Image (tube, rainbow, N blue to C red):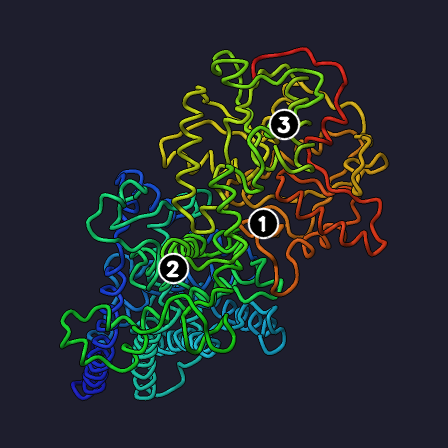
Amino acid sequence: MPGQSGGLERPVRLVLILGILLNLLALPIVVRRLVFLVRLITSGQPAPERLHGAGARVATAIKGQIVEVFGQRKLLKWTVPGMAHLVVFWAFMILSTVYVEAYGALFKPDFEIPIIGDWRILGFAQDTIALLALGGIIAFGAVRFANSPAKLGRKSRFLGSHLGGAWLVLFFIFTVLWTMFLFRGAAAALGNFTNEGAWVSQAIGRWLGGLSHGTLEFLEGLGLLLHIGVMLAFLIEVVHSKHLHIFAGPVNVAFKRPPVALGAAQPLMVNGVPVTMEDLEQMEEEPSLGAGKIEDFTWKGLLDFSTCTECGRCQSQCPAWNTDKPLSPKLMIMNLRDHAYAKGPWILAGEEAARAALPEKALAAAERPLVGATEGDPSQPSGGAVIDPDVLWSCVTCGACVEQCPVDIEHVDHIIEMRRYQTLVEGAFPHELGGLFKNMENKGNPWGMGARARLDWAKDLPFEVPVVGTDIENLDGYDYLFWVGCAGAYEDRAKKTTRAVAELLHLADVKFAVLGNGETCTGDSARRAGNEFLFQMLAQQNVEALGEAGATKIVVTCAHCFNTLKNEYPQLGGSYEVLHHTQLLNRLVRERRLVPVARPAAQPTQSTVRDVASTADTVTYHDPCYLGRHNQVYAPPRELIETLPGVTLKEMPRHGERSFCCGAGGARMWMEEKLGSRINTNRTDEALATGAQRIAVGCPFCKVMLTDGLTERQTEGRFADVEVVDIAQMLLAAVKTEPVAAGSQA
């Protein structure tokens, strides 16, 4: 130390030697693991779309780092754990400067970072954030105690997570903090650390001031070695555990699908190139379709698996998991990650001779099928396949997992990829889907109804509905093509919504036309069930029909049609301005082309569940997943409800981005719900608990599912005065019966 005798330099040299040894022991372990992880992740299939458009990609990546990584936006959706993580994250960022000081102190006890080392603001920030981080880890501990799987079972979002590792990391963070204060306090007492802004360290230095010089040197050296040593141990733990997300998370955020991995499903890719049926016919070798083994996932998929924090936010929001089904998005990702790591040596081994020398674990992992029967609990397989079919087919593709994930894992994309392989290659899909595929292929709709019946909904309307190709040649001079959809054309409950929208557009003097029997199913259910080629066949027919009609602006009532036309048809050359009917109707109300003047009154119906209750004045709104989470349309339906005279909107506990699925998405509309309890009943019960007389919806799938749930409760003799109704029906009952004077074109 400066100004001390040569004898006092020996402890300094010993600290330096021990510090170097610690690094020589730890860093090779870390580097070796990182090399393995980088090689494994980059061995995945190409994902060129993650690199295309360098300028836009860089801008998106920078925004993601600012908003999600440094701003912790997604984590802060859950206030207490979010704030705790925010302060611990920023403690890591700010206290990295302390490690610069610590390594410098190995060589020079009074080392200061050049230029900024003596800034009081730096010392204050270091000590203050360290204290806040102590509070953060206490909050983490409290959250884990409160959500203990031993106490809550399936209701705990930490069920299946590596709890021991989480507590170990909290201990590491705590040790990093107290050893920092120990070595800086002792250094302050010795005069080696003089930053007066470091108020806690200086206070500890004054408290230690009465100790002997030799004792202080010992404490300074001990604190310094412990501070560096625990960081190195922490680093080893990080690269071998879920805490790899500290490094992988920012990278994953940088390469995410902007703005979020929802809306359009990813196209079927072969060697990083989107393929069609025609492309496959021209390929010399039979390609792998979808994900049939772990190495079929893209490098972004393998990065996703490695990034999982095991926080369980996805699990806590998953409709399947919350109704006692085996699918947990978290556990699925963890199983895929663990399988990838176990099979990694086999994947990376080049020559057969090298493979023959592989450890037994890697060889056993290489033989495991990706999807198939598992041993024991299918959500946590200990043997057999990696993913149980019941796990794979329980998904409703609602997107709650993707919306909640703080590190932008793309769960739904991976599920669809595995379903594609099962459907297209193995032919292994739930038997109910066989009839669905046949009806869609032969009849152009899931119900197997004839095309001539597509216009039955328009019978007896007090005005004519023009049909493109029959009444008019094309859409020149028309404001919108009204895409009716299969449900809107064939399903009795959805027909009422279709009629209501048509009447409202007519009242508002909006010129619209329909395709009639020129319309076929958009293919949403086929694509999400993995039948990509059936989807492409239907989509190409529709794109051709829309092109011939000259469609540029489309209004739809089905959230699934809305998402498919808006987000997926551009993949096949069809780009349109697509509006959900609640968006357009809300616009028309704002423009006073539709004027609600009375409380929505009852309309005669033979249905056992009335369409509009004459005495109802409280409404709760159910967000369709493919309108809300997948497309961020939350405000227009609510604004529309709030314009209705005498109507009060009462939200369910789970609404907006945390809304609970009706259970129909992901082709589940067409499958029997044999496991656990029914998703639609769970959601209906939540709606009924609000005390509202109406459950308002904006999607025919949701209307079917929630009406069925309500009917089930009404057969028990309860809730006879409650109804499920589309917002368009409510609006129609509230507007003037005479046409409103037309304003500007919609």
Q: Position of residue 490 (x, y in %)?
A: 62, 35
| Residue drawn where x is 24% and y is 59% of the image | 42
Q: Quadrant of the N terminus?
A: bottom left
Disc 3 marks which amino acid? Answer: Asn
Position above or below: 637 against 140: above
Most foreground residue, 492 or 150: 492
Residue denoted by label 2:
426
| Residue drawn where x is 24% and y is 64% of the image | 38
Q: Who comes first in sequence, dot 3 or dot 2?
A: 2
Q: Which label sits in the foreground, 2 or 1? A: 2
Q: Who comes first in sequence, dot 2 or dot 1?
A: 2
Q: Position of residue 178 (x, y in %)?
A: 42, 76
| Residue drawn where x is 26% and y is 48% of the image | 272
Number of the label disc, if any, that sits on residue 669: 1
Residue denoted by label 3:
586
Q: Which label sits in the foreground, 1 or 3? A: 1
Q: Residues within 10 Å of mark 1 (few under 14, many from 20)?
A: some
Disc 1 marks which amino acid? Answer: Met
